[in-house]
Amino acid sequence: MTTLLETRGLKKHFGGAHVINGIDFRIDAGEIRCVIGPNGAGKSTFFKLITGEHRPSEGSVMFLGQDMSHVLPHERIRMGMSIKFQIPGVFPDLNVRQHLTLSLHRAKDDRPESLDELLQRFMLENEEHVLARNLSHGKKQWLEIAMAVSLRPKLLFLDEPVAGMSVEETHATGELIKRLSAAGLTMMVVEHDMTFVKQIASRVTVLHGGSLLADGPLEDILARDDVAEVYLGKKK
Amino acid sequence: MATLPNVYSLVYQFGDNFAYLVLAALGLAVIFGMMGVINLAHGEFIMCGAYVTIIAAKRGVPLPLAMLLGAIAAALAGVIVERLVIRHLYDRLFDSVVATWAISLIVQQTMLLVAGPSIEGIGTPFGSFSLGDYSFSTYRAVLPLIALAILFGLYLLFFKTNYGVCARATIQNANIAQCLGLRTDRLYTLTFALGAGLAGLTGALYAPTMTAVPTMGSNFIVQAFVSVVVGGANVIAGTTPAAGVLAIIQTGLTASYGQLFGQIGLLVTVIVVIRLMPQGLGNLFTRLR
Amino acid sequence: MKQTKMPSMSACPRALQTVPWLIALCLPLVVDANTSGNLAYCLLWAFSAVGLAAMWGYGGILSFGQTAFFGLSGYSYGIFTLNYNDTWFESWLGLGAGLAVSVAVATLIGYMIFYGRIKGVFIGIVTLSVTLVLETFMSQTAGPQWAIGEARLNGYNGMGGMSPLTIPWPGGPLTLENASFYYLVLILLIAVYAVMRKLLDGPFGLTLIAIRENPQRAEMLGVDIRRHQLLVFVLGCTLGGVSGALYTIWGAYITPSTMGLTAAAMPVIWVATSGRKSIGGTILGTALLVWLSQNLAVYGSQYALILLGAILLIVVLAAPEGLLPFVTRQLKRLSSRTSDGTRHGGACLKREEGKS
């Protein structure tokens, strides 16, 4: 089993605030890893440390065995990471077709997926010529995921992909992610929505107070008392 | 061996350059610092102050009063500009640069048409004094002190008056300020008028020392935005030290290589500072505190 | 739902787009030599405007430095040809020298700006500072000690007397002036237009737009933002240099006032008015505005400048996407009654659409 991503003793503090306190973390190929935790647990910071937006105060982030401390954002993408941030990041003045043309152009693949295939896979066939600024929130997220996926990454990072979505959209996104995984894509998803996590996760990591509380297959995590107490706030 | 006249000559030069930089920059700094607007018509407010001062003085108005009139005229012009043009562009700050450039062009060329290439100026008051082989203009020797007095007045305005508190609150968070009942639109108009008035005051102060031409604003613009860029958005903690540093650079270069290199030295400093310290010196100071 | 179309998907057939070019090609046949020369003058500024449109309209980079490169290139041509003017070949080398200097300086400044992470308005300030440094420097060069070889820089008196472009011709070298110079400018313009359209309609242009709209997102697509910005900057500034060299050739004269504050405002005015997102529109708009200024200048240059300033102000306030696109949109709205956004019914304005 190839390890795609690994963090060793990862720590981050901002001035006096210790946000991440030594996390050892690993993602192997083929997983859908969900990272959950209550507010303030450090999920966002952890995500930013991995994607390179923050530099670690201590410890390291290794991607495919390489230390990522000095790798610039656009270089990380070239190495096989693909990132979708929480806030929809689209290009307001371009339409859906142009977005995908752009990302397919960046993919530099020998056998690029056809644009129409992409539109179908991500349920955007009816919005091909719509400007991104006029898309609904859910479709914007799908467009972003579509762009991220069209780069043929080795590891896809999704930060709260269903934030702000309706129940139907959330479920459709979950099915989409499962299809992507079945096609061989490894993913790390930071999420709040437990229904969604239950729908997609293969393994779950629980963060609490900047440390790793629990890490394991979905069923194991759901059965643990300490997770239930910390996260769901109830005693079993 | 440095003799007193030589030393004083350097001090005088420094004071002269410092005053010029500070006074040129004040109006621009206030508007940029408070509102984020880069007012490329700044030079024209200076010109307005100068012209009104000269015209008033020639009509017999005592000089200090004429200067006050000049500043007020510029402030009024500022109100008009803000209401008609600037207020539509607060969400498009990029465009405000272009718009003020357009205003500058229009005003300059209109003045050229209406008032001709130059008008007869007024003489520099207070004569001169000498030290050793050098002779210095009393008026220009006093200007740095006037500049410092104005700075002090601004400090009082921003930190000790109601306006100052409201203005600073609005800069830091306009939305919340509005929710607290502050009339931010009136505040912006007042602030822009203040900036314009300060520019007019600069023009008024320098009117007795230079020929009044419609394009005189351009002479100040370079010094103004050099000081603002190097000093950052903070008017008191940024622009003033910046003017000090720049005055040293300019005086040094001019003494060694002449006026031209003094000027170029300033512009090169801008480029270097933007590259190294995008937030300007002011940011450095506030972070050190 | 408002939809915009990419320039290449114009409703007008390709054939119609070539009409203005054909008209331009035929003009010297119907006007006298002097007018041809004047038409060439109107056209030569278009390169600088196209460069700014590419940088600003696509890349979101508002540079106030076009006139700096205008001057650099013009002076380079002058210095080169005043020193070497024995053969026809050397005048063309002079043109090359002007371009080479533009490319070199643009790369240097661009590297400092984009790899130094200077953004937004500060790019304008830095480029304006560069322009002013150059103008200040050149204006002080009136003394005889300021000379490079045979070429005296001459400060505000300007540098003049450089040789025009000549080409070998049966019967002796032919000096390119009036009609022949007009054709040179026009052919260059067509070439530049074709290249820019190809470049900006393709992935490069799309990437630039992406960088402009959402730099972080563009980075997440693996785009090296700084490299793309540097490329479009060098391209845009060099086009400014093309205008400068052609101007110097046209009038056999160049002065520092071509790099002053007022001159620096001109490209911004032309591009903002014509609509910075359309290369063809920019060419047309610039030529028209220059022609307008020339005619107004007869009454006094102040009137021309006041009008241009007023136009710019109105454009910024009321039609920020540009006057030509604004007018086009209004006319389309008037003539088209359908709400179906994919059809472009109604009158098709040849000039506007054709150039877009």
Image: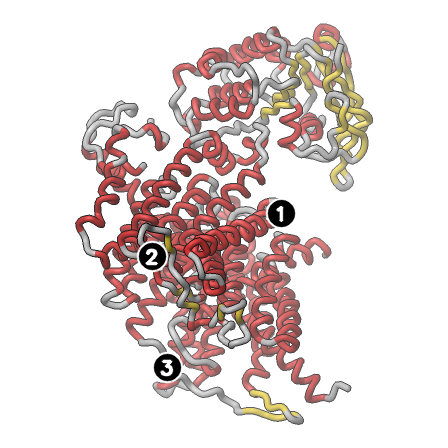
Which mark sits nearer the N-terminus, 1 or 2?
Answer: 1
Element at badge 1?
loop
Q: In this figure, which residue is indicated by the disc labeled 3?
A: B56
List x then y, in percent, for residue B110. Answer: 31, 68
Q: In this figure, which residue is indicated by the disc labeled 1?
A: C116
Residue at the spot x=25%, y=44% of the render?
C25
Q: In this view, does A212 lie above or below B219?
A: above
List x then y, in percent, for residue C58. Answer: 44, 39
Residue at the spot x=33%, y=58% of the render?
C309
Q: Is residue A102 above or below residue A167?
A: below
* Amino acid at pointer 3: Ala
List x then y, in percent, for residue A23. Answer: 79, 24
Q: Quadrant of the N terminus of chain C?
A: top left
Indicate left or right for C152 with C182 as reference: right
> Image quarter for residue B141?
bottom right
Q: Quadrant of the C terminus of chain C?
A: top left
Total tally of numbered discs in the picture: 3
Element at badge 2?
strand
Q: In this figure, which residue is indicated by the disc labeled 2?
A: C175
> For the residue carrying disc 3, how many other residues have a C-alpha within 10 Å: few (<14), some (14-19), or many (20+)?
some
Residue at the spot x=48%, y=87% of the render?
B124
Return the residue nearer the eye: C71 or B226: C71
Return the residue nearer the eye: A1 or C36: C36
> Image quarter for residue C50?
top left
| Alpha-carbon span between mark 1 and mark 2 | 45 Å
